[in-house]
């Protein structure tokens, strides 16, 4: 659900998956005025960091980057390097701290390229900011085979001894994503993923039908994991086409994560909005072999994101969610 927390922006982000939240066109306007011009320069923490720890002596240009629906995004060019900065006037640092921890965890695997996070902090007039590496994108989304291989390498390298979850709760779009640690993947996915979204639908829409049927699925989905060894792998968590790009050398880049440690297959939950082709999956499974029952679980992982879209954007996504639930209840005879 990258539309709600845009990071380094790809000009190839499609809007077809999010009809209620169309991103504006990428602006090419350039200005020397800071997006935080209302803040005294002496109290501008972004400028202070760039001109100290960022090792720059001069900010040469500040260019607004369009596409965000919640955050203001800018490119800061300096005599040292370029930085990507997001600010939010109404939300404290916790959202950006979670993003930075996710980016940092993926960066530390040394596998697929992600923007390196540098600094998160509060704004003196309220709100928060995050500074990260600016990545110059190439002319396409990159090679699908390379993306599949690099993603699998990240899943293979990023392991957790704590089980399933993450060190901090984060967001999937603008929806809270609960990452309380668990040693049981089926329980974690049932409670912190499907269960949370089902309760949200009940509270928000009074949708008792989808809640009760969904809870039946949660309680009966265990057999879908028979004969499967589920390891806690580091997941991007929100991998759709708007969060995938490539750098100038054609290497894949992923951004705007909703990271946690979970079953590797859960990474494909947004595949209906990602355009993964055969070469992607072939390369992925060469590194991370396909597990028994993969096809039977695919829709289960899509369900989390369909439910989230239902909660964010309304009834247009209810039928897809309900259809998946009904199909599984029939298969499981629950």
Image (tube, grey):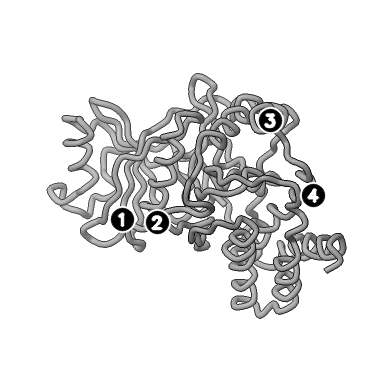
Question: In whole angstroms, how far apart are the C-alphas of marks 4 and 1?
Answer: 42 Å
Nearer to us in this view, 204 or 330: 330
Between circles 2 and 4, the one closer to the viewer is: 4
**Is 190 displayed left or right of 233 in the figure?**
right
Between circles 4 and 1, the one closer to the viewer is: 4
Q: Element at badge 2? A: helix
Q: Element at badge 1? A: strand
Could you tell me residue 280's position as x and y percent?
68, 30
The residue to which callout 1 is attached is: 128
Q: Say if mark 4 contacts mark 1, CB within 8 Å.
A: no
Mark before the other along the chain sequence, 3 or 2: 2
Mark before the other along the chain sequence, 4 or 3: 3
Mark before the other along the chain sequence, 2 or 4: 2
Question: In whole angstroms, how far apart are the C-alphas of marks 1 and 2?
Answer: 9 Å
Could you tell me residue 182's position as x and y percent?
53, 59
Dot 4 crowding, Cα within 10 Å, few <14, some 14–19, many 20+ = few
Could you tell me residue 20's position as x and y percent?
62, 58
Q: In which quadrant of the rendered view does residue 66 lie?
A: top left
The residue to which callout 4 is attached is: 296
Which residue appears at 76% of the width and 54% of the height? Answer: 224
Mark before the other along the chain sequence, 1 or 3: 1
Dot 2 crowding, Cα within 10 Å, few <14, some 14–19, many 20+ = many
Q: Say if mark 1 contacts mark 2, CB within 8 Å.
A: yes
Which residue appears at 68% of the width and 26% of the height? Answer: 286
The residue to which callout 2 is attached is: 95
Mark before the other along the chain sequence, 4 or 1: 1
The residue to which callout 3 is attached is: 280
Q: Which mark is residue 112?
A: none
């Amino acid at each position: 659900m990258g539309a709600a927390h845009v990071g380094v922006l790809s000009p190839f982000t499609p809007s077809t998956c999010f009809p209620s939240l169309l991103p504006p066109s990428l602006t090419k306007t350039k200005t020397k005025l800071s997006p935080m011009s209302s803040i005294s320069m002496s109290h501008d923490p972004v400028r202070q960091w760039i001109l100290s720890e960022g090792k720059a002596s001069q900010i040469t240009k500040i260019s607004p980057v369009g596409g965000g629906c919640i955050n203001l995004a800018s490119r800061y060019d300096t005599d040292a390097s370029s930085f990507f900065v997001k600010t939010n006037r109404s939300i404290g640092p916790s959202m950006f701290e979670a993003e930075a921890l996710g980016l940092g965890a993926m960066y530390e695997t040394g596998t697929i390229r992600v923007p390196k996070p540098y600094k998160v902090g509060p704004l003196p007039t309220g709100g928060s900011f995050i500074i990260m590496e600016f990545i110059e994108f190439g002319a396409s989304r990159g090679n699908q085979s390379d993306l599949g291989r690099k993603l699998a390498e990240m899943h293979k390298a990023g392991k957790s001894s704590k089980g399933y979850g993450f060190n901090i709760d984060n967001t999937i779009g603008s929806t809270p994503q609960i990452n309380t640690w668990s040693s049981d993947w089926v329980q974690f996915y049932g409670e912190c993923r499907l269960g949370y979204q089902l309760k949200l639908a009940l509270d928000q829409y009074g949708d008792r039908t989808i809640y009760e049927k969904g809870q039946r699925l949660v309680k009966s989905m265990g057999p879908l994991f028979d004969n499967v060894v589920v390891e806690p792998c580091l997941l991007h968590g929100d991998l759709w086409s708007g969060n995938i790009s490539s750098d100038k050398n054609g290497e894949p880049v992923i951004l705007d994560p909703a990271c946690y440690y979970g079953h590797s297959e859960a990474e494909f939950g947004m595949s209906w909005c990602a355009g993964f082709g055969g070469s992607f999956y072939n390369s992925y499974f060469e590194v991370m072999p396909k597990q028994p029952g993969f096809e039977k679980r695919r829709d289960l992982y899509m369900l989390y994101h369909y439910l989230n879209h239902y909660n964010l954007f309304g009834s247009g996504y209810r039928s897809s969610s309900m259809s998946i639930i009904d199909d599984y209840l029939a298969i499981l005879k629950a």
